[in-house]
Amino acid sequence: MKRVVVTGMAGITSLGRDWDSIAANFRAKRSGIRRMDEWDRFTELNTRLAGPIDDFVVPAHWTRKQLRSMGRVSRLAVWAAEQALQDAGLLGDESIKDGRMGVACGSSTGSTDEIKAFGNMLLNSVAQGLNANSYVRMMPHTTAANISIFSALPGA
């Protein structure tokens, strides 16, 4: 029988990026949902509500090389994974690299900018906006792959 142990947690939401902020917003009965005026251009979209994360800033210690293959969805997922490893006391720990740990991260899609560029290529026969990292940023498993690469977890 295999066992799973959860030792740390983290998240990034429109209500905050740490439990104290999220809990305070819950207690204050605040919502992270807002009207997305920029969606008015979509005439047949039946909603204009979302819970965006508007204030995310890439951490200063992330390198340009690390960021090359990370679209927005991966940046958010990798940030949360890094915080969860920190919470668990495992960030930078050698046990991460011995093959006993892995990554499970659900994402229904990769980053939309790259999906748009691939769609544009298919519809208009132009490769504008595509580069060597576009597929990695677009693929549905981009979050798990980038968390594994960023954290040096070989068992993705």
Image (tube, grey):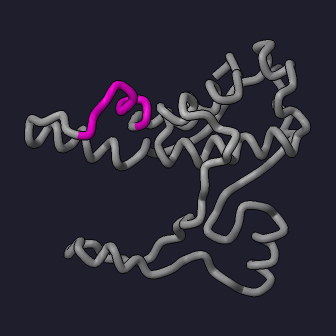
Residue extending farthest top: 98
Q: Position of residue 143 (x, y in %)?
A: 55, 37
Q: Residue at x 44, y 76 (%)?
A: 49
Which of the 4 image quadrants contains residue 89?
Answer: top right
2 drawn magenta: no
Q: Residue at x 42, y 45 (%)?
A: 111
Q: Is residue 150 left or right of residue 87?
A: left
Residue extending farthest right: 89
Q: Is residue 122 left or right of residue 68?
A: left
Q: Residue at x 77, y 46 (%)?
A: 83
Q: Residue at x 24, y 38 (%)?
A: 118
When the figure is inspected, residue 46 is found, relative to residue 139, above or below; the finding is below
Q: Position of residue 40 (x, y in %)?
A: 28, 78
When the figure is inspected, residue 149 is found, relative to residue 31, above or below; the finding is above
Q: How many marks?
A: 0
Q: State the extent of the magenta-drawn residues as a range.
A: 129-137
Image quarter where the C terminus lies is: top right
Q: Position of residue 147 (x, y in %)?
A: 63, 33
Residue extending farthest bottom: 28
When the figure is inspected, residue 144 is found, relative to residue 30, above or below; the finding is above
Which of the 4 image quadrants contains residue 86?
Answer: top right
Q: Position of residue 62 (x, y in %)?
A: 64, 38
132 drawn magenta: yes
When the figure is inspected, residue 60 is found, relative to residue 146, above or below; the finding is below
